[in-house]
Amino acid sequence: MSGDAAGGGISRRRLGGGVLALGGALALAPIPFADAATAMGAGAGSAAPAGPGSGRPAVTLRRGSPARAGLLPGPLERLVADAEAFLAPSPAHPWYAGAVLLAGRGDTVALHRPIGKAVRYSAYDEATDTGVEFPADRQIAMAEDTVFDLASVSKLFTSILAVQQIERGSLALEERVASYLPDFGGAGKQDVTVRQLLTHTSGFAAWIPLYKEPTREAMLRRLWDEAPTSPPGGVYRYSDLNLISLQLVLEKITGRALDVLLREEITAPLGLHRTRFTPPPSWRPKIAATEDMRQPWSGLDRGLVWGEVHDENAYGFGGVAGHAGVFSCAWDLAVLGRTLLSGGAYGRARILRPESVELMFTDFNTDFPGDAHGLGFELYQHWYMGAMATPRTAGHTGFTGTSLVLDPTTDSFLVVLGNSVHPVRSWRSGSAPRVAAADHLARAVPVSPGRGRSAWFSGMTAGTTATLTLPPLRLATGEGRLRCSLWWDTEPETDVLVLEASDEVDPAWLPVPFTTTVTSSGEEAGTPHPAGSVSGWSGRVWHRLHADLADRRGRRVRLRWRYATGAPYVGRGVYVDALRVEDGDRTVFDDSRHEDAARVEAAGWSLSAD
């Protein structure tokens, strides 16, 4: 089956231009697409050092405490507790039979926890909508090294293999797919490009049942004859057919099968010993079972699938496919994530150059707001990245219950592997466990107060309104102004922070325009916010805020911050610090003064040191 449908978010064009290569030389230009990435330097899978000529290896992962990772322990403990809650009905059935959770930052894995069962059910009883459990002595508990069918997370491996070939000059991003696979160009697909396959803008239908064809040759003929449902480049539509097609391109230009490419170019160099297509029977006791596959909910009658690929089309291709079929464990995925966060290197192995990795974290879909996409990676998707989502956060999900999220702005990574189609796919819906885990990891990354030991924090509760209100203040001159420090990271447009004022002349709470300036920028002009509000991502840095209160001269005014969140997703929240109201040369409020801070009315806000 194709992966989970994409959700909301806001696309972001990186100012200053995209990364591209012309004639094999890397350059920066104010256009978002690359005809090829750099073809210079160490090739994929080589044992090059992390830094050119440095002789020093890139970081490798180690287990350590939250403190060593620069994370707060409380949110990580809540991450596990919330994940365990989804082992119970949520709401009607468990979201998964079990899961393996892994979270870290930098070179440290601060959390690696198995919960629940890797194998629990022998079958699904359709008549009673219940799972038929194995006897207790035949059930298998989840373990740290349990291997999962990654489903669509497999697309990331195929994408990396493609970017390696782009780097080497044997594949061009803007070249037509038909130039590599002439048969592909039929039925109106002659202008589809490699980039459109990687960014799901080819125009392909979301899914077709290739597995119903009797032979591999017939499956390929069905793909060649498939016409786009929209003009190439015209819409974003997530489709497994894109990565299946990319697999065929890679096999054609390299002369190697996809499973061989995976082993030689990614898993062997990085030491991913628990990652492969078509795991051998000896692995079965360490693999999480998936679904009791029977019609009508499945396209095939296979019974309990355990140790074989779950996806029907991947099964039709013999378990090796560009869109699904890779099996892996949490630690191996963490190594892959650490490799990409380190610019393509892990230890003494380098599988990509930093410029090539940048292509995977750059939004190529700026024409399709909400569907931000790098090469292979989805970007800025709150629907499963939760509060980890930023314009640079990259990840992917898999239909079986898997996900990987990488946030380069905090150097953090999250792996959630669940067997959520065990015993049947209809038992789970949405991505609530993924979102909850991502929210907790985001909260575990501390935010240092702008001044002093604590700052006012809005919290991270969805579907609520929190207010932070200053006491009544008399402004005698026409030189009233509010100054403070502001940090925000919210779900764009849905979650909004508004500065408001009320007085005896205008008792209604009305927005107050303000300007913000990045604290470390040295700029003076700042960014105007005429609506008196901010939303989205501020870059994880503090901003200086200035609001002119001259029109409140002679009035007894109240000021407040109102933070309203939608449901079901939120960002990391808002921090306000160093609140100061001046009236000419007189300070009428300063929250560093105990007596002033004590008069602040906080509803939903709290003082936080992190």
Image: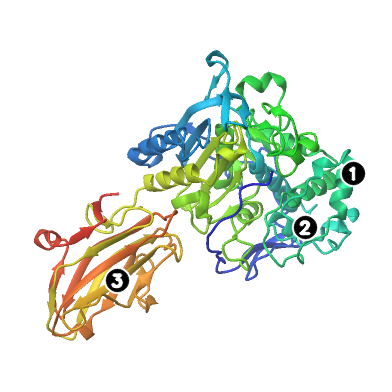
The reply to whether callout 2 and callout 3 are in contact (CB within 8 Å) is no
How packed is label 3: few (under 14 Cα within 10 Å), some, or many (20 or more)? many
Q: Is residue 158 visible?
A: yes
- Kindly check if marks 3 and 1 are in contact, taking CB atoms under 8 A apart as contact: no
Q: x, y (%) of residue 390?
A: 49, 57
Give the labeled residue for mark 1: 218
Q: Is 218 in front, or is 192? A: 218
Identify the element where label 3 is drawn.
strand
Residue 16 drawn above or below residue 456: below
Of marks 2 and 3, the one in the foreground: 3
**Colouring:** rainbow
Give x and y (percent) for residue 364. 64, 62
For marks 3 and 1, the one nearer the N-term is: 1
Q: Position of residue 217 (x, y in %)?
A: 90, 42
Q: Which amino acid does label 3 sit on?
A: Leu
Residue matched to label 2? 172
Q: What element carries label 2?
A: loop
Q: Is mark 1 on a helix, strand or loop?
A: helix
- The CA span between labels 2 and 3 is 49 Å
Circles 2 and 1: CB distance less than 8 Å? no
Most extreme residue toward the front is 127
Numbered label attached to residue 499: 3
Q: State how far apart marks 2 and 1 are (Cα).
A: 28 Å
**In the rendered structure, which disc, 2 or 1, sits on the residue that comes first in sequence?**
2
Is residue 351 shown left or right of residue 581? right
Residue drawn where x is 68% and y is 39% of the image: 297
Of the two numbered discs 2 and 3 on the same chain, state the one appearing first in sequence. Answer: 2
